[in-house]
Amino acid sequence: MLAEWTDLRLLEATAAGDEEAFVEIYRRHHPRVFRFALRMTGSRDAAQDITQVCFTALLASPSRYRGLRVHLGTYLCATARNQSLKRLRRVHREVQRDLDNRSPDGAGGPLGMLLAEEEARLVRQAVLALAPLHREVVILVEYEGMALSEVAEVVGAEVGTVKVRLHRARRKLHRALEPYVSRSTATAVSEDARKS
């Protein structure tokens, strides 16, 4: 029954002390908030802490959320963004860890798995090397599938600013990954030539 309720109704019930309503809010929005924080910080521990802070703040002050202005998921991502940026400002170097628990597809045998892991690691490093303002828009658009207008709400900027940041971030990622793409393309071409 709670699964059919709107976020606003669940939030009102939470404010009235309904724990099950809060659990439903958490169930709905936890995965996205956690993934966003994980990709922003590169640390599972930091992402768990940030996610906990977001939901604890929502539980403590549900009235801070303005349901008519923005979706609850967007509001929670904005809170996670602020917490992530605070954490990144305190940390002098970024922690390199797995961003996903997903294991690579076994296609191609051990060599294929090794290459897929290496490719994923290179992409993670390139994303983590972006400035936080560029990293967050890439994560929200490319990984979370948010519309530019939603991203603008999360980061507190105009849609045009988000477009510029996304364009610059993609250009930086392309430059960072170009040597790898060129090398793997050249390898594939030479392997095809050898097979002929």
Image (cartoon, rainbow, N blue to C red):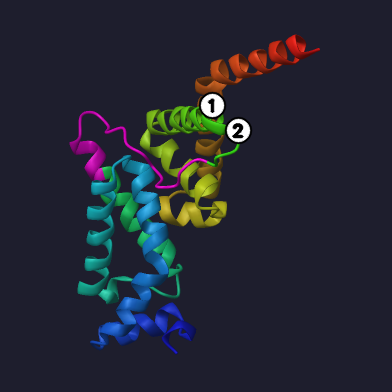
Crowding around mark 1 (Cα neighbors within 10 Å: few <14, some 14 to 19, many 20+) is few
Q: Does 35 appear above or below 73?
A: above
The residue shown at (33%, 39%) is: 42
Q: Total of numbered circles in the picture?
A: 2
The residue nearer to you, when weighing 97 against 9, is: 97
The residue nearer to you, when weighing 98 against 36, is: 98
Q: Does 185 appear above or below 40?
A: above
Marks 1/2: CA–CA distance: 6 Å
Residue 18 on the magenta span: no
Q: Does 142 appear above or below 61?
A: above
* Helix, strand or loop at mark 2: loop
Q: Main secondary structure of the magenta part?
A: loop
Looking at the rendering, the stretch of residues picked out in magenta corresponds to 86-104
Question: In this orientation, does residue 36 appear?
Answer: yes
The residue nearer to you, when weighing 111 against 75, is: 111
Which residue was labeled with disc 1? Answer: 111
- Residue 115 in picture, x, y percent from top left: 52, 27
Task: Check the image and name the residue furthest to the front.
Answer: 109
- Residue 66 in picture, x, y percent from top left: 37, 72
Q: Does 30 appear above or below 126?
A: below
Which residue was labeled with disc 2? Answer: 108
Residues under numbered marks 1 and 2 in contact, where contact means CB atoms less than 8 Å apart: yes
Mark 1 is on which residue type? Answer: Leu
- Residue 63 in picture, x, y percent from top left: 28, 76
Crowding around mark 2 (Cα neighbors within 10 Å: few <14, some 14 to 19, many 20+) is few
Mark 2 is on which residue type? Answer: Gly
- Residue 77 in picture, x, y percent from top left: 38, 57
Question: In this orientation, does residue 156 appear?
Answer: no
* Helix, strand or loop at mark 1: helix
Q: Quadrant of residue 54?
A: bottom left
Quadrant including the C terminus: top right
